Every structure is written in structure tokens, then in C-alpha cells.
């Protein structure tokens, strides 16, 4: 039984945001740090993976759709990635890092004090690209949780980059938000589990982080990309409008 677990989702290769969260005392002291996918697809992919692998067994890894896309691109299984920075990020990885991402599991499961059995996934337990939102219909949750072990009382998912907690058909659902590409408000968003759920936000020096990305990333469009995502210029309303049709509405 884990006393406390920190959940970091959708880092998207943004090293300064990750560094800021890992410096939080509760994250450093957590029994486990669970990564719920989309870890490296961004401006500093190799550096982010090196920092996380150095933490050893404290880290529990879960794959996201963007991680899968990087692997598929490197292995010649796809020529395009929805996020324009994706092909550059895929090419920036070492081969051992491609192998790491290729071997990540789609879900992880831990027993957490106060929450019981917790399932961690990227989008939904059954799919790494499905969309569920804070206001998804009860029927939608029934659909995406079909076949899930009844012992699982809490599901933690990422993918939509917006933090929330809600009950869905008797299960607690937690989305920690995004470390590197937040929608709605700036900062690096994460969650602390045990014995309850805390949605947390780490504020860091965004102008300095943008400058670091522009200096260190060789992708030609890094300036506009960093300005847009680190300053959270996509609002939660914008994101909900885009994601709504993918929620089956």
C-alpha cells in the first residue's frame, strides 16, 4: 500500500516545467511518481527521459498516444504526427530511448492509502486516444469503463491537459492536467494521491523557460510553440469545444 503517489501527466518534453515539479517536496518524498503518458513528445525529449530514468524505481511509467507516435515515426510506421513538433522530437531520441518508449505499458495499477486500488492510464483504460471530460455523460463513462475490474475504485487519466476530479458511476476519476502543455491556465499541473486527492499547480519562471527552449531546441518553430503552450494561450473553453465531438456528443 502506497502512502502517497505523485502523478505527472503530459510532460511533452518540457524540461524546465518537469524540473520545477520534481523539486516539489511532496513529489521528491512520494512513494512513487506515476507518469500517465505523453512524456517526451516536445522540445527536449531526450533530456526529459534522461532526468526521469535517473529516478530509478520511484518512477512508474505508462505510455501515451504521443509516445506511441514517436516510436512509430522512428520505425517508419508513420510519416505524419498530429503535433507538428512530433517528427522532430522522434528524431531527437537515442535508440535506447525509443526502445524505452516502445516497451511502456498502457496502464499501471497501485494500491494507495485512502483510495484503494487505483488504475493509471493515459486517455481511458482501454484506449490511448479516447476523450473523456469533466462533463462527460454517465453513459460515456459506462462505455469506457466496460470490463474494468470492480476492485478499481479510482481511475487516473491524462490526455486532455485539463485537471479535474469527479465521480463517474461510483468511481473517482482524476485528471492531473498537464506539466508541459497546460490548457486554461499556466503552470505545471500535477496531482498528489493519498489519502485523498490534491490537484496541484507548480508556478515556474515561464519567460526563462521559453528562453531555454528557444536556446536548446533545434526545431525551427520552437519560439511560437513555446510561447503558446507554456503561456497556456489555449483556454479550457477552447479545449472543451475541440474535444467535445470526440466525447461522442
Image (cartoon, rainbow, N blue to C red):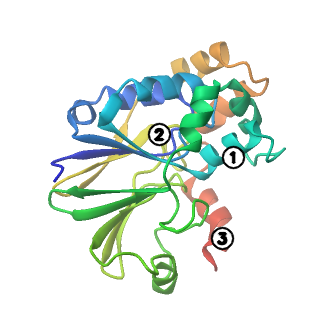
Q: Which callout, 1 or 2, points at the residue further toward the start of the chain?
A: 1
Query: Where 234 falls versus 218 (above or below)?
Result: below
The residue wearing badge 1 is 69
Whichever of labels 1 and 3 marks the residue nearer the N terminus, that label is: 1
Among the 4 quarters of the image, the one containing residue 236: bottom right
Mark 1 crowdedness (10 Å alpha carbons): few <14, some 14-19, many ≥20: many
The picture places residue 155, in percent across and down from the top left corner, at: 36, 65
**Rounded to the nearest whole Å, what is the CA distance between mark 1 and mark 2?**
19 Å
**Residue found at x 31% / y 25%:** 23
Based on the displayed image, in which of its 4 quarters is residue 43 positioned? top right
Q: Which residue is mark 2?
A: 179
Q: What residue does disc 3 label? A: 246
Nearer-N-terminus badge (3/2): 2
> Foreground: 187 or 126?
126
Q: Can residue 84 be spotted in the picture? A: no
- The x, y position of residue 68, in whole percent, is 64, 47
Question: Mark 1 and mark 3: span between their CA atoms?
Answer: 19 Å
Q: Percent position (x, y) of residue 218? A: 73, 18
Do the residues bearing badges 1 and 3 touch, measured as CB atoms within 8 Å? no
Drawn side of residue 105 relative to residue 60, left or right = right
Secondary element at image label 2: loop
Q: Secondary structure at mark 1?
A: helix
User: Which residue lies most toward the bottom here?
Assistant: 139
Q: Residue furthest right?
A: 79
Q: Nearer the viewer, residue 113 or 77?
A: 77
Q: Are marks 1 and 2 in contact (CB under 8 Å)?
A: no
Q: What is the count of numbered marks? A: 3
Asked if residue 71 lies left or right of residue 151, the reply is right
**Residue at coordinates 27% horizontally, 41% vertically from top-left?**
32
Tell me the tag on residue 148: none
Closer to the observer: label 1 or label 3? Answer: 1
C-alpha span from label 3 to label 2? 23 Å
Amino acid at each position: 500500500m502506497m502512502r502517497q503517489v505523485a502523478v505527472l501527466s503530459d510532460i511533452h518534453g518540457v524540461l524546465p516545467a518537469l524540473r520545477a515539479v520534481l523539486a516539489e517536496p511532496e513529489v521528491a518524498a512520494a512513494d512513487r511518481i506515476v507518469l500517465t503518458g505523453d512524456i517526451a513528445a516536445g522540445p527536449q525529449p531526450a533530456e526529459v527521459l534522461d532526468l526521469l530514468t535517473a529516478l530509478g524505481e520511484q518512477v512508474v511509467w505508462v505510455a501515451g498516444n504521443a509516445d506511441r507516435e514517436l516510436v512509430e515515426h522512428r520505425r517508419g510506421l508513420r510519416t505524419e504526427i498530429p503535433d507538428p513538433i512530433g517528427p522532430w522530437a522522434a528524431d531527437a531520441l537515442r535508440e535506447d530511448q525509443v526502445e524505452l518508449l516502445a516497451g511502456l505499458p498502457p496502464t499501471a495499477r497501485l494500491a494507495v492509502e485512502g483510495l484503494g486500488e487505483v488504475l493509471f492510464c493515459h486517455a481511458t483504460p482501454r484506449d490511448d486516444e479516447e476523450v473523456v471530460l469533466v462533463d462527460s455523460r454517465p453513459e460515456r463513462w459506462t462505455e469506457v469503463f466496460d470490463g474494468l475490474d470492480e476492485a478499481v475504485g479510482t481511475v487516473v487519466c491524462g490526455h486532455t491537459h485539463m485537471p479535474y476530479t469527479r465521480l463517474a458511476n461510483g468511481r473517482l476519476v482524476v485528471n492531473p492536467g498537464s506539466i508541459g502543455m497546460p490548457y486554461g491556465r499556466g503552470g505545471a499541473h500535477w496531482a498528489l494521491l493519498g489519502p485523498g486527492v490534491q490537484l496541484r499547480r507548480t508556478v515556474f519562471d515561464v519567460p526563462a523557460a521559453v528562453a531555454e527552449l528557444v536556446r536548446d531546441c533545434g526545431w525551427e518553430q520552437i519560439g511560437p510553440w513555446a510561447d503558446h503552450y507554456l503561456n497556456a494561450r489555449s483556454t479550457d473553453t477552447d479545449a472543451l469545444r475541440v474535444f467535445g465531438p470526440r466525447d461522442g456528443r
